[in-house]
Image (cartoon, grey):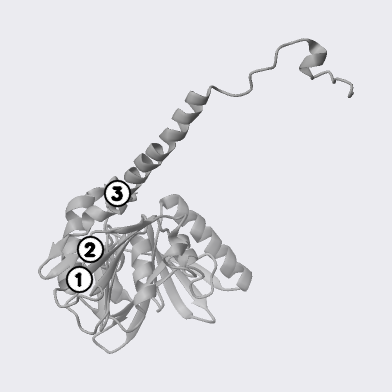
Amino acid sequence: MARPTATDPAATGLPPARHAAPVVVRLLLLALLPLLAAVLYERGQQYDPTLLNFKSAGHPLTTFLPKQVENWRREEAVRSFDKANLYEYVDGHAEYFLSAGFRALAVAEYRLPTDTQQPSAVLDLYDMGEPLNAFGTLMDEIGTNGQPVAVGEAGFQNRRGLGFISGPYYVKLAAFADDLPLLAVAQAVERALHQGAGPSTGKLSLDGLFPDLGTVVATRFIKENYHGWNFLQRVVERSFKRADGVVIQAFSVTGTPEQMATLEQAMVAFFRQEGTAVTERREEGMRILQIADRYEGDWIVVPLARGWLGIFHPWEDAWKIPLKAFAPHG
């Protein structure tokens, strides 16, 4: 006969322990499991994807996307993305948007009555945080093929696309066919942005960045290392054609007085190290920094209250009047 162990009831003299719940209780729990699963399934079917709307300046981005514009009808489901999952929509290009100030994105599909198999166009509404970030993104994405169009603070259109900015928002419409009337949808979204976002979001006035130096020929945004100078970042460049046919290139940089003072110190230190002369003159109460650059030629910088105006051309007395009118606003 085997020797009883210390845990054997025969060895301890104690009655057997109760390890299991009564049979009735166990059967009741098993019966409740299918009911619980059914409730959870029903809750899951009630999920509304349009509720997942990332907010911008206190407003859900989807509130800026009209459900009907003339013959265009918006599909109900609107996809939303933030910094954590943007790569799911723009895989391989997410880092660009994140480095440019991206905050949130809403993606909607619009359909014309004649298109039954697929959407007529896809609309991307990006919140880029600041108007200048939105402008830079627009200029990078539209390239040199876009034609100016009257929507937002700056807008461009080509055969299958339209892009514009409104405050810190960048809006992109991509069509599935050539020459669709995208402008109606773009203007409706721009009105919604203007009415709903409020004045706190700010606006970008490109004309407010430059004085009248002639007819505008081209406008560009350079995010970093302007002209190879690592101290010049986030630059708006504009080319002007004068009445005498001369094309003048100018640039604008904005910032706080403290930021601009630091920028001036960096610029002067850089040119001093290169052996480039930087001299100062006064015109109509304005400071003019003159740079005798062996690479760029003679050009000037006009330090203003909240930014710089640079002109790649030697000083001309004819600029006194337009600069004097521009300086209080620059």
In front here: 15 or 110? 15
Q: How many marks?
A: 3
Which numbered circle lies on residue 111? 1
Left or right, 328 with reference to 67: right
Compute the Cα span from label 2 to label 3.
14 Å
Q: Residues within 10 Å of mark 3 (few under 14, many from 20)?
A: few
x, y percentage for residue 3? 89, 21
Mark 1 residue element: strand
x, y percentage for residue 306? 37, 55
Q: Is there any visible trace of residue 321 in the rendered image?
A: no
Circles 2 and 3, Cβ within 8 Å, touching? The answer is no
Q: Residues within 10 Å of mark 2 (few under 14, many from 20)?
A: few
Viewport quadrant of the N terminus: top right
In front here: 250 or 164? 164
Q: Which residue is mark 2?
A: 75
When asked about the image quadrant of residue 81, the answer is: bottom left
Which of the marked residues, 1 or 2, is nearer the chain's N terminus?
Answer: 2
> Residue at left 49%, top 70%?
92
Circles 1 and 2, Cβ within 8 Å, touching? The answer is yes
Left or right, 229 with reference to 289: right
Query: What amino acid type is highlighted by mark number 2?
Result: Glu
Q: Is there any visible trace of residue 97 in the rendered image?
A: yes
Mark 2 residue element: loop
In the rendered view, would you say 11 is above or below 310? Answer: above
Which numbered circle lies on residue 51? 3
When asked about the image quadrant of residue 136, the answer is: bottom left
Query: What amino acid type is highlighted by mark number 1?
Result: Arg
Compute the Cα span from label 1 to label 3.
21 Å
Query: What amino acid type is highlighted by mark number 3?
Result: Leu
